[in-house]
Image (tube, coloured by chain):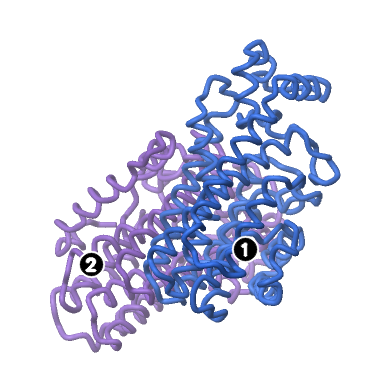
Chain colours: A purple, B blue
Amino acid sequence: MAFHLFHEIEEDLKLVEAELKKQMETTQPTITAASSHLLLGGGKRLRPAFVLLAGKTCDYQINRLLPLAVALEMVHMASLVHDDVIDESKTRRGIATVRARWGNRISIHTGDHLFARALILIAELGDSRISQLLAKASVKMCEGEIQQMESAFDVNQSFKSYLYRINRKTALLLSLSCQLGAMAVKAEPAVTRMMKWYGHHLGMAFQITDDVLDLVANEEELGKPVGSDLRQGIMTLPILTALLRDPSLKEKVRKKEKTEEEIREIIDRIVKTGAIEESKKVALLYLQKAKKELSELPNSSVKESLVKIADFIAQRNY
Amino acid sequence: MAFHLFHEIEEDLKLVEAELKKQMETTQPTITAASSHLLLGGGKRLRPAFVLLAGKTCDYQINRLLPLAVALEMVHMASLVHDDVIDESKTRRGIATVRARWGNRISIHTGDHLFARALILIAELGDSRISQLLAKASVKMCEGEIQQMESAFDVNQSFKSYLYRINRKTALLLSLSCQLGAMAVKAEPAVTRMMKWYGHHLGMAFQITDDVLDLVANEEELGKPVGSDLRQGIMTLPILTALLRDPSLKEKVRKKEKTEEEIREIIDRIVKTGAIEESKKVALLYLQKAKKELSELPNSSVKESLVKIADFIAQRNY
């Protein structure tokens, strides 16, 4: 993420980073090492950023927003470390995964530990509506992951099933970050609702863009080889669109073990169907919806930032 | 557990069972199947029983106690399903584990899902102290699991490290069940504290007894072969005691892959050191401490039950 979009909360994002580092310290050296490794791996810290930005829609209180921002990033990290076990991933953002370095067992515990630590922060806020919303989102996120696993290599799945999945995989936690950030500073219910939907639409666009980049990005910028969704059989919007336009691709996409040459050939053919452009259009539609949610917010620098972020997502290439 | 000890809460335990069954129903068929399989595997439902019994120390309200009882059992189930991945277990309580039947991925998600569903129930209680205590206990439980993993096959570890581990592995959640049950019905702080410590001491005794049974139980009653701790390198109280009395056993215990014959030989030698009797004595000491906690409770049928449960734990053979 281009960090200039977050200039408004730049200083407080540093506090988030410092607090995240502190949260990685545990009584258990291996968990500390694995969690710190995960943290150093970086990431865009989108969830904390949206918590803080949403907090700007009302009476900004960093003491309430900080634990929330940190907790939501930790929930995200916990889901990543479990996902890496499940996907048997060797690298993430260009560095070795916790699983590759410490194995499955440590990864499971590190994920459980991060999640439980996040819950402490949330519980300490003393607002059980926040705990409830987070718990409900976590349940749905799990269901999304399972659905992704079970629909792998299913070349006949519907667009609806794709949208269901990316909502749970990505949009939900971004939406929740926006919603809880607003709730934590006691924003008007209407504002909280707008932020929730802004986050949802933005999250959908974000994942669609991710799915496009997984096929056509520069590998160095992406930090991993292109085509990982094809390798894992995850049917994304550009892939499903291409299959609809060129059904003869189905057989190749369905194949479980693909050579690098086959991956490259499939990507070339996907590009030729125009599915990349089509998917980018869908992402743009979601971004328009996201911006529309903001229309009733009073003009302010935070509103401007939120609009700019939506515009940026559409054109990012990493 | 001998169910006659629970006659006081027998009807409400049926409600717990029904509610647990309901909680296993999800929108995701595989999670539903895996969770239901886990539930059908049975278990003593100790945690729900203690929640309910603790609730009898004050103004018993099943509507507040039921979600708590169900949630704590689900947290326990979640930890079991993750442990089975970590231990690569094939059976639990005589039936196939979720891992053996559905694999690692589904097991991780089923565990995450059960835990998150439990959190919804807890959050709905609207008491953030309860959420906090559960989150803190979950963090410690993870740390205990990691410590167990890292200290495997370490024949020179201290008794203190064993006690640390079984506190996190078992006593903590039993203690929390007693404590939260009392808190949920707004028992006096002194009563809540007594229940917390009763649960702790009872839990310690329970795990020590488990560790003894893992060496000398009837395999049919145990539902798994004896010696699984020796196989996994988990150093329990009877093993550590035996090693202190007969250091020449260390080499055999330290060995990673043991034949069935070696396991049997080690167990015979452990028995000969008197370590089994010694460990049973330690369990008894904890049970006495547990009963002592109850001494200031007014006499009542629930107090009687709690005493009887402590007495039963000492002599159980399954």
Q: Is residue B8 above or below residue B195?
A: below
Q: In this orientation, which residue lies closer to the viewer: B140 or B181?
A: B181
Q: Badge 1: few (under 14), some or many (20 or more) residues near its Cα, within 10 Å? A: few
**Separation (CA) of disc 2 from disc 1:** 46 Å
Q: Position of residue A90 (x, y in %)?
A: 52, 39
Q: Is residue B228 above or below residue B293?
A: above
- Residue linked to disc 2: A64
**SS under mark 1:** helix
On the rendered structure, is A30 left or right of A236? left
Q: Position of residue A209 (x, y in %)?
A: 42, 63
User: Looking at numbered disc 2 in the image, what kind of residue is underneath it?
Assistant: Arg
Q: Chain of mark 1?
A: B
Residue A278 visible in the current orientation: no
Q: Position of residue A221 (x, y in %)?
A: 36, 46
Residue at 33% x, 62% y is A47
Residue A74, quarter of picture: bottom left
The numbered mark at residue A177 is none
Residue B75, quarter of picture: bottom right
Residue at 60% x, 48% y is A263
- Residue linked to disc 1: B304
